[in-house]
Each structure stands twice: as structure tokens, then as C-alpha cells.
């Protein structure tokens, strides 16, 4: 269970997403920690049991899904680095549901990880690890205003730009690694 917790903690990376959360707050977006956490948990739990079948129903594999998610992460990274608003918030839950719950917390990387963990660990251990991660996520999201005060405007600005570039790099890595898998699959078929 500890291994599953650590793997999910690294993939969810709520601490690394803090600049995104702070940036959304500065744009005047409402972020409800409870709503974001509970929606992300529900999505992840559902995907853990139904994800592969659901994607297969639409004829989409996990690699294609991850590539689509990489585009969303890339756009969010561009917003942070360039100070633009490309991604329009039209979610009824404000920013709590999109982009916080999905795709930041419950996104392609987490989905792929959950499917991989199911092959290695008991389902109960994965669920416990997921619950513990969501509790941590809730407390981090709930304390963002405190973290903002501690870091100051300059610290937030630098962190936003730095993590924007990191998010761009993560999006490109996610795209390239999944594109390589799809390319190999196409090559094997021909």
C-alpha cells in the first residue's frame, strides 16, 4: 500500500500544481477544495474499474487518451508562461472541476498509473492509497491562500513561470512517449 501511495503521490503531484491553482485564483476562478477533491476521487475510482472498457467502447486506447490530455496540459502551461487566458472556464463548478479535478488531479498520467497499479497491487491497497492521496490534496487545496501569503506576490510569479515551463515539458514528454508507443504499434501492423 505504501508503494501505491508513493507512486500516486508522485503522479498526482498536487504540490507541483500549486502555481496552477494560485494562477486560477488570481484570474478570479472559484476553487472549492472539497468539490475538486471529491470529483477527482470519483473520476479516478470510476476509471480504475471502468476506464479500459470505456475507452475501448469508443475505440480509443490509453495512449491516444494520454496524447489528448497532453494538449490540455500544454495549453495550461502556455497560459502560465505567457500570462494569457486560452482555456475558457465554462465548467459549472468553476475551476474546481475543470481543470483542477480533471485533468490536473485525474488526468491521463493518473489514469495510466491506476491501470498499471491494478496489475501490481490488490484493489483494496490501491483504493486506500488513493483515499490518502485525496486527503492530502484536499488539505493542500484548502491552504492555498495561506501558501500565497507566505510566498508573496514575487514568489508566486516566479513559481508560476517556472512551473509553467515544467508543465510544458511534462506535456511534451507525455505526448512523445505515447506517440512513440502508437508509432511502434502502427509499424508492427504494417
Image: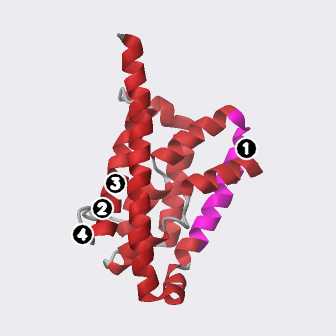
Look at the numbered disc 2 and give the secondary structure of its residue: helix
Residue at the image position 64 percent from the left and 39 percent from the top: 117
**Extreme-right residue of the structure:** 2
Q: Is residue 39 above or below residue 151?
A: above
Of the image marks 4 and 1, the number of the one nearer the N terminus: 4
Mark 3 highlights which residue? Answer: 74
SS at mark 3 in the image? helix
User: Which SS does the magenta portion mostly show?
Assistant: helix
Find out whether the residues at labels 2 and 3 contact each other: C-beta distance under 8 Å: yes
Q: Residues within 10 Å of mark 4 (few under 14, many from 20)?
A: few
Residue at 44% over, 28% down = 181
Asked if labels 2 and 4 touch by Cβ distance under 8 angstroms, the answer is: yes
Can residue 49 be seen by looking at this rendering? yes
| Mark 3 or mark 1, earlier in chain | 3
Q: Which residue is mark 4?
A: 84
Disc 4 secondary structure class:
loop
**Residue shown at 65% from the left, 49% from the top:** 7
- Magenta range: 120-139
Which residue lies under the disc numbered 1?
Answer: 124
Amino acid at each position: 500500500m505504501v508503494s501505491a501511495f508513493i507512486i500516486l503521490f508522485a503522479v498526482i503531484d498536487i504540490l507541483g500544481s500549486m502555481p496552477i491553482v494560485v494562477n486560477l485564483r488570481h484570474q478570479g476562478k472559484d476553487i472549492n477544495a472539497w468539490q475538486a477533491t471529491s470529483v477527482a476521487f470519483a473520476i479516478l475510482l470510476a476509471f480504475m474499474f471502468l476506464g479500459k472498457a470505456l475507452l475501448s467502447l469508443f475505440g480509443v486506447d490509453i495512449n491516444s487518451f494520454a496524447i489528448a490530455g497532453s494538449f490540455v496540459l500544454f495549453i495550461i502551461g502556455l497560459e502560465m508562461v505567457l500570462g494569457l487566458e486560452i482555456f475558457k472556464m465554462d465548467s459549472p463548478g468553476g475551476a474546481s472541476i475543470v481543470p483542477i479535478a480533471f485533468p490536473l488531479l485525474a488526468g491521463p498520467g493518473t489514469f495510466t498509473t491506476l491501470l498499471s497499479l491494478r496489475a501490481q497491487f490488490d484493489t483494496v491497497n490501491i483504493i486506500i492509497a488513493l483515499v490518502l492521496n485525496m486527503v492530502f490534496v484536499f488539505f493542500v487545496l484548502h491552504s492555498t491562500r495561506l501558501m500565497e501569503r507566505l510566498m508573496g506576490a514575487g514568489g508566486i510569479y516566479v513559481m508560476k513561470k517556472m512551473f509553467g515551463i515544467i508543465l510544458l515539458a511534462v506535456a511534451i514528454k507525455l505526448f512523445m512517449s505515447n506517440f512513440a508507443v502508437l508509432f511502434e504499434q502502427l509499424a508492427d501492423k504494417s
